[in-house]
Amino acid sequence: MARVSSLLYERGANILHADQHVDHQLGLFFMRVEWELNGEADGSANLEPDQAHGRAGFDLDSFKASFTPLAAELRMRWKLSSSAQRPRMALFCSQYLHCMADLLHRWRTGELHCEIPVIVSNHRDVENLAAFYNVPFEYVPMTAATRAEGEARQLELLQRYKVELVVLARYMQILSPAFIDSYPAAIINVHHSFLPAFTGARPYHAAHERGVKLIGATSHYVTEVLDDGPIIEQDVARISHRDQVEDLVERGRDLERMVLSRAVRWHLDRRILCYGNKTVVFD
Amino acid sequence: MARVSSLLYERGANILHADQHVDHQLGLFFMRVEWELNGEADGSANLEPDQAHGRAGFDLDSFKASFTPLAAELRMRWKLSSSAQRPRMALFCSQYLHCMADLLHRWRTGELHCEIPVIVSNHRDVENLAAFYNVPFEYVPMTAATRAEGEARQLELLQRYKVELVVLARYMQILSPAFIDSYPAAIINVHHSFLPAFTGARPYHAAHERGVKLIGATSHYVTEVLDDGPIIEQDVARISHRDQVEDLVERGRDLERMVLSRAVRWHLDRRILCYGNKTVVFD
Amino acid sequence: MARVSSLLYERGANILHADQHVDHQLGLFFMRVEWELNGEADGSANLEPDQAHGRAGFDLDSFKASFTPLAAELRMRWKLSSSAQRPRMALFCSQYLHCMADLLHRWRTGELHCEIPVIVSNHRDVENLAAFYNVPFEYVPMTAATRAEGEARQLELLQRYKVELVVLARYMQILSPAFIDSYPAAIINVHHSFLPAFTGARPYHAAHERGVKLIGATSHYVTEVLDDGPIIEQDVARISHRDQVEDLVERGRDLERMVLSRAVRWHLDRRILCYGNKTVVFD
Amino acid sequence: MARVSSLLYERGANILHADQHVDHQLGLFFMRVEWELNGEADGSANLEPDQAHGRAGFDLDSFKASFTPLAAELRMRWKLSSSAQRPRMALFCSQYLHCMADLLHRWRTGELHCEIPVIVSNHRDVENLAAFYNVPFEYVPMTAATRAEGEARQLELLQRYKVELVVLARYMQILSPAFIDSYPAAIINVHHSFLPAFTGARPYHAAHERGVKLIGATSHYVTEVLDDGPIIEQDVARISHRDQVEDLVERGRDLERMVLSRAVRWHLDRRILCYGNKTVVFD
């Protein structure tokens, strides 16, 4: 912490926000620093550090050059990024559109700092919505039989649109290990239960069957083990004996929207750090 | 509903609160009615219907006589009780006393409408607390080897103290099927996780290991399958990557206190109805 | 309760859901009953009683005829409605569209059982959204000087479109007493604070200034006294010292969406009963 | 941040936890650092940094000597404390004992890192509880007429018992400006409403009268303006039209316990920083 903040100080960086975390069990030290250049900031920049970076025109490459030896000496694993660079996010969905509609509206209103170059679906239901937000829509049919070609087509699209993050907004198909490997810690899914409870299909039916008093939703990074990836965010809602499965499905939609949009937001703001099978979400 | 409320009307009962529930899947109709006798109520009675019953001196037996044939005709399963009769509740615990201290304080302040004739533990830690609240304490050591005698001793105590409800306030021993059978839907336990996630031992360690963002606690009736009985109440608290297992244990204590005390409260007020493996908790 | 349920029983009504409430202070008894006709129900009908009514073709007028004398005898104030009749709801907004987009999406997905004949705004920002959902849009400019004509025009539109409920989805203009009187308990507003805290303008600024640890939002019926009408729903979100006013505004948008959509949903399902300056929201 | 962490590094301090905050509006930088000495830490120490400090026997005075000039150069306002020093906390109460019982139990179980040299009350209800926890009890009657002598007596007691923090656990008397001035930012109160709503007396009655759907509680530092001091923590609970004032009082007790115990905990762990009329609560 001393060495990094000293270097930033020498380089005239003005720290806007810094957060550290120590994992005593694994003996790991985590640090996230957000800064702007002195004199470049103004009121709005202070309130929107993300833009500030861009305007400050901070020379990433030259900083990298002086930071690299320090990082090597301290045996850091590190990443340096400019908030002026907006990640390119692809949205996948099937026939349920509530998460999709929510993410697109948040993007339109400026809540999500990213580009959305493409929407991919194995159904045509989302086509109108995509058109309304002027996002290219790609229809990729997917059946057990055609999974291989389907995923090949999807990967080809992701490459063509230079996608850096894939968000599964209630996309009901299971991804192959090969697909997942091509986007490590860069595929975010929302599962409609409070994981690890009710993994797999029809979690609302399982929750109703078990008679729980709260239902939940979980956003997580996708790994090869179904519903087992690093958890990013979770939330719950109170239900009662009066609620039928249909009511849980409806109540759950609001939870799914919330936990997925928060996860996407945090990932885009580079606030999530994955290690082991967990996430650190910096303040 | 028509027939029951009509009978109550004829008998001069003044309905204070009524609640119904229909399970359309099973085709079951549930109803709970709370009443007092006309003219017997006053302001405080309205606010404390429980006492009102007692004061009203409603003749349960004579009402039972006229209600029985109606119930038979409508093929009801029913229960009639006077809130003047305070259930006799036994508290079991091991070495963690936070739930015990919470329940005893609530009882002392009048929140819990019951008698507490005895506190049973396989440790002596609770002895002072029991003495402070003037509740007889019975020490019953329990080891794998001595379980049989231990439970025999416990059952003998429950019988002697005329116990109707057993509350496991962080009692860390597993009960035998025989013991459980002797108190059907009358043993309440608190499990320190959001069931059905993290059943069994060390749920906080498991939650930390999995990297969940919320921890929970669950109060439920005890059945032969561990942590699988009808759920009465659940609640959760937000945690972060900063929280170690020790922090979860501490945060969790507040959840355990809340969900257990609510379950006990509702059971004592005869607001819980068990069916299948679920509970109906009437408003 | 006895007399009403008996009459329903005689008339062959099958009670799907009933809820009562007694206000002991005012000595008032409240009751809501939802039913279908025997033999008309099937599985899906049980799960969607609202549609069931319609299909059951229950003869409201004939039932009214037999219910009226009973109601008179018991001095009831009552309302009888068929869930087959979908209320006609007008949406008002200004330049913030998050609540509008949320309500329209919920309506499209079938969550809101109503017609939306018209969207009214003093800005043109909502025009595209209205077009996307095929809802007629009416632009009614509004300034201090032109309020009188503006409201006259709005009322004329509401009449033409046969509007029964007006929802102010972040509509930033104050309504005149005359306008409010023309829709008693039928104008729902969302205020972006936890009422009664921070009434009036810029509540998020006031909340930040005061240093609260939770922000809230409140949906309520509009009365002549600003932000003082019967509260329908409230919710809160945790904030910290890190959150600037801009962050509160953003966090608050989710609260506003939730509390307004719930209030609208409950009103459309005839679950809200207004009395004094309070609401009863039936289960 | 660079200079401070560098100095700590040179002095062989091992940072356990650090947190910063920037108030861009006021142009203030806040920092809290928690450390132990290298080589002194072990597993348990890592999990309980507070004890670690003590064991590490860090020389506060010598560190102070080298830190003072740096702090002066950077124009800091700073405080240095050892977690081995347990603050001396006095508890004040009147006749309601739920917060008192909760704090004493948490103290007994080790949740609260402090000494409790004395309990002061204008009633005798708490006397038994104080005796059970072996805390000296001082009865100080208080009436409008005798306030002056009463407070003089209280201050004399606080001095004799070397009290550093005063916690008002539902103490129903208003303190004089003189009393408050003698403990700046060191008197914590719990108010039974979601401030700034329902300040003053009988907030539950006011909440019931207004028909809110959530009730709250607030812990805050006491200042001369009633219920207006810096807010430390707030929480809320959902209520319904069924809840009478008595129900709110009962539900509220749990909220009061939670928000007061959290505030006390954070203050004792030196995690709260007061500025202006707000608090920074460090993670």
Image (cartoon, coloured by chain):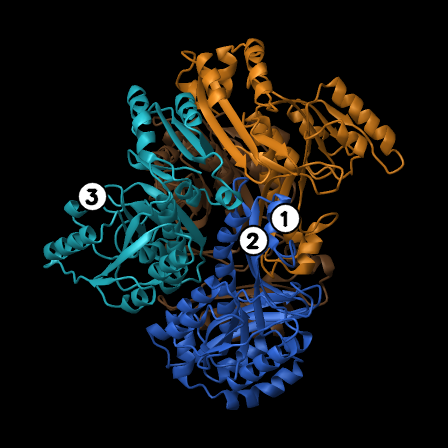
Chain colours: A brown, B cyan, C orange, D blue
The amino acid sitting under disc 3 is: Glu
CB within 8 Å, label 2 to label 1: yes
Q: Do the residues labelled 2 and 3 touch (CB within 8 Å)?
A: no
| Element carrying mark 2 | strand
Q: Distance between the residues labelled 1 and 3?
A: 46 Å
Amino acid residing under circle 1? Phe
Query: Camera-side residue: D34 or A228?
Result: D34
Q: State the separation of the CA atoms marked 2 and 3.
A: 40 Å
Percent x, y of residue A233: 46, 49
Secondary structure under the numbered disc 3 in the rendered image: loop
Q: Quarter holding the N terminus of chain D?
A: bottom right
Within 10 Å of disc 2 (Cα), the crowding (few <14, some 14-19, many 20+) is many
Q: Where is residue A75 in the image (x, y as percent from the top left)?
A: 43, 69
Q: Circle 1 sits on which residue?
A: C194
Which residue is nearer to you in this view: D14 or D105? D105
Circle 1 residues within 10 Å: few <14, some 14–19, many ≥20: many
Q: Give the mark toward the camera: 2 or 3.
A: 2
Residue D272: x and y, percent? 56, 70
Q: Which amino acid does label 2 sit on?
A: Gly
Q: Name the residue under label 2.
A: D216
Structural distance between the alpha carbons of marks 2 and 1: 11 Å
- Provide residue C13's location: percent of width, then percent of height: 46, 15
**Closer to us: mark 2 or mark 1?**
2
- What is the chain letter for disc 3? B
Label 3 sits on residue: B224
